[in-house]
Amino acid sequence: MNGISLKKCPFCSGSAYIIKGHGIYGGIGYQIKCSRCEAVTPIEEAGTQSVVNANGFREINISDVEAIRRLSIRWNTRQPT
């Protein structure tokens, strides 16, 4: 992925890489995985997602690029999921 820089694994300092696979609901999903200890992030979904808030129900579309960007930010800042 061009322009995406991933920090080393917080557990073992191994190299991290992005995996493309199936999402939770059958769509496309992405994860980051450590090449040494195999620690892996939860799946970040791409595609159409339903959102419910105080204004009601709506659908949003998350591109592959946006899903990977969100995932890499969580990995690099060590945000809990």
Image (cartoon, helix red, strand yellow):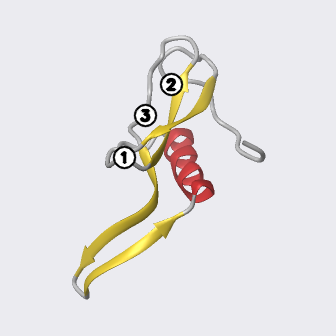
For the residues marked 3 and 1, what is the alpha-carbon distance in whole angstroms?
18 Å
In the rendering, which numbered label is found on residue 41? Answer: 3
Read off the residue under disc 2.
10
Q: Quadrant of residue 35?
A: top right
- Going by the numbered disc 1, the residue's amino acid type is Gly
Q: Nearer the viewer, residue 73 or 20?
A: 20
In the rendering, which numbered label is found on residue 75? Answer: none
Name which residue lies at 52% across and 26% down.
Answer: 33
Q: Quadrant of the N terminus?
A: top right
Give the mark toward the camera: 3 or 1.
1
Where residue 39 sits in the image (x, y, percent)?
44, 21
Q: Quadrant of the C terminus?
A: top left
Say which element carries label 1: loop
Give the mark toward the camera: 3 or 2.
3
Name which residue lies at 37% across and 75% down.
Answer: 59
Read off the residue under disc 1.
26
Classed neighbour count for the residue bearing mark 1: other residues with Cα under 10 Å, few (<14), some (14–19), many (≥20): few
- Going by the numbered disc 2, the residue's amino acid type is Pro
Name which residue lies at 48% across and 16% down.
Answer: 38
Among numbered discs 3 and 2, the one appearing first in the sequence: 2
Asked whether disc 3 touches disc 1, contact meaning CB atoms under 8 Å apart, the reply is: no
- Left or right: 50 with respect to 33? left
